[in-house]
Image: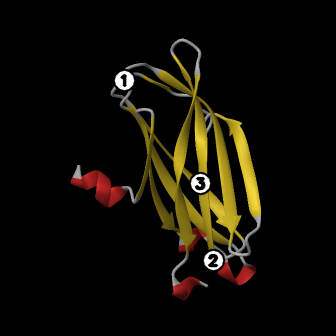
Amino acid sequence: MLIMKELFQHTAITDGITVRVAVNFLPEQSRIEAGKWFWVYHIRIENDSNEAVRLVTRHWRITDGHGIVNFVEGDGVVGEQPLLKPGQSHDYVSGCPLSTPHGSMEGYYTFEREHGEPLRAAIPFFPLAAPATAG
């Protein structure tokens, strides 16, 4: 799985659910002169457990360079609540704007197992860091 390690820099595993994150600064979406920096992140969720799980909610903790924390919670991811059978994965891409050139994100997903029990799967901590030339 060398490709996985190269593409996804951050990984967390909880009860057979692997969450991988790749993050990139997007200068073309940023307006640094206006104090706006923007990152895109690619998430891959893999179900390595023995049962199907449905992603129900997301819970993010986003911290900017001044230590100001914002919590973002909601149903599913990018408008979807994917059902992942054993061995399946789900990918999505989203973005995060900040008013500082550095920050971080972390959180968790709430899944529902086949028989209705909840499962809380960690989203790994990952830094948001603009290159020195962009800030």
Percent of width and height locating residue 104 = 60, 64
Q: Which residue is denoted by mark 3 in the rendering?
A: 106
Q: Is residue 28 above or below residue 54?
A: below
Q: Mark 1 or mark 3: which comes first in sequence?
A: 1
Q: Is any part of residue 77 visible from this angle?
A: no
Q: Nearer the viewer, mark 2 or mark 3?
A: 3
Give the distance between the C-alpha atoms of the residues marked 1 and 3, in whole angstroms. Answer: 25 Å
Q: Marks 2 and 3, how far apart in space?
A: 17 Å
Question: Looking at the image, what colour scheme do you see?
Answer: secondary structure
Percent position (x, y) of residue 115?
A: 54, 11
Amino acid at pointer 2: Pro
Q: CA distance from mark 2 to mark 1?
A: 39 Å
Badge nearest the viewer, 2 or 1:
1
Residue labelled with disc 1:
86
Front one among 111 and 84: 111
Q: Residue at x 59, y 15 (%)?
A: 116
Q: Which mark is residue 101?
A: 2
